[in-house]
Amino acid sequence: MYDFSLLSGETRRTLIIALVLFLFAFISFCVVAIYTLVKTNVTSKKHKGKLKLVCDVAYFHERGKRDNQEDSLYISPMDKLYESGLVAACSDGMGGLLNGEVVSKFVTDSLSENFPYKFDAQKENSKIITGISDKIYEQYHLSAGATLVMVHIFDDYMNFYSLGDSNIILIRNNKATLLNHKQNYVTLMIRKLADGGLDTSDAYKDNRAKGLIDFVGNLNCNVLKTNHPIRLIENDIIIVCSDGVTDSMPLNRIVSHIHFDQNATGIARTIKYGVRARKNPRQDNYSAVVIKMRRSIF
């Protein structure tokens, strides 16, 4: 114990003043901290519904058992996000045809050259994609082709465009939905069998099941597109990927593997390693753009 009575009067006064100043500074700090916390919380709640969603974006681009990487990705410039939105696309060169990697790269390069796109001009954007397809047809005459899946996100809404059998997946509230139907024979046969009241499982037994009925490289291709934009909400996850991903990781497996507190980079890493862990001896190339929607006060 210290005997402060031994200190001189001047020293005791100095200590008392220092203690008072410290207490004043500490109380002031606490008041400012509490005010800032309360103000930030109130502001966040007040404006939460008015804040624009922010796109957190990541990707992976992996070669499977094929000799060449025939997948190609495109992500529009992030510095144009607020004025032109985000465009993300995946093109998969068709196996068994010529120059798959060249064609898929041509598709994504052409998408890049045509950026920016008007968000509410789905028909115009579809014509741009049809024009790209016609150019491929003029050069290869159906001896080469590629698939295409593309999303355009602006503010809280998304449009998509699709050709072939690649995937656009929306994960919301722990449920995954494939937004685009595959333009292959199995889809066509399922419709015909269902219309006739027959067992649709027979469609999968047909040798032509996975054959595409439309793709980039077909003349006057039929681009699947949204007629009305899809409203996005916070924590939505959008996956734009080649079928090499879903062949090894079906939608339910993707959902079971990811954690919803992960950012886009973490989700992309989880899916990539999930496909790799399957060790599919016939693994196709697997590539994807992963987008997670989040809100920010900044």
Image (cartoon, rainbow, N blue to C red):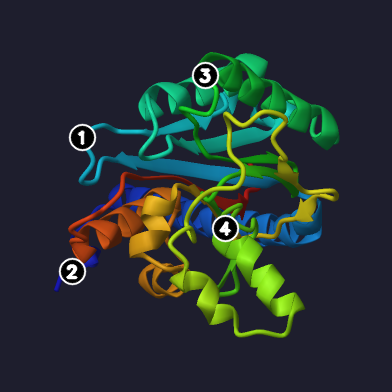
Residue 273: quadrant of the picture: bottom left
Say whether marks 4 and 1 touch (CB < 8 Å). no
Check disc 1 and report its element: helix, strand or loop.
Answer: loop
Name the residue beneath numbered marker 3.
109
Q: Which of labels 4 and 1 is toward the front?
A: 4
Q: Which sits earlier in the primary sequence, circle 3 or circle 4? A: 3
Q: Which mark is residue 185?
A: 4
Mark in the foreground, 2 or 4: 4
In what element is the residue under mark 3?
A: helix
Expressed as whole percent of the image width and height from the top left, the position of residue 175 reads: 57, 74
18 sits left or right of 234 in the view: left
Q: In the rendering, at what x and y percent does residue 185 appear?
A: 57, 58
Q: Which residue is mark 1?
A: 67
Which amino acid type is shown beneath numbered disc 3? Answer: Asp
Mark 2 belongs to which amino acid? Asp
Type of amino acid at the residue the image marks with label 1: Asp
Closer to the camera in the image, 210 or 41 = 210
Q: State how far apart marks 3 and 1 are (Cα).
A: 22 Å
Question: Which of marks 1 and 4 precedes in the sequence?
Answer: 1
**Label 4 to label 1: alpha-carbon separation:** 26 Å
Q: Earlier in the sequence, mark 2 or mark 4?
A: 2
Looking at this view, is 296 or 205 the one in front? 205
**Number of the front mark, 3 or 1:** 1
The residue sitting at 61% across, 52% down in the picture is 183
Pair 3/4: label in front = 4
Residue at mark 2 = 3
Q: Of the numbered discs in the image, which one, if any, rests on residue 152? A: none
Name the front one of labels 2 and 1: 1
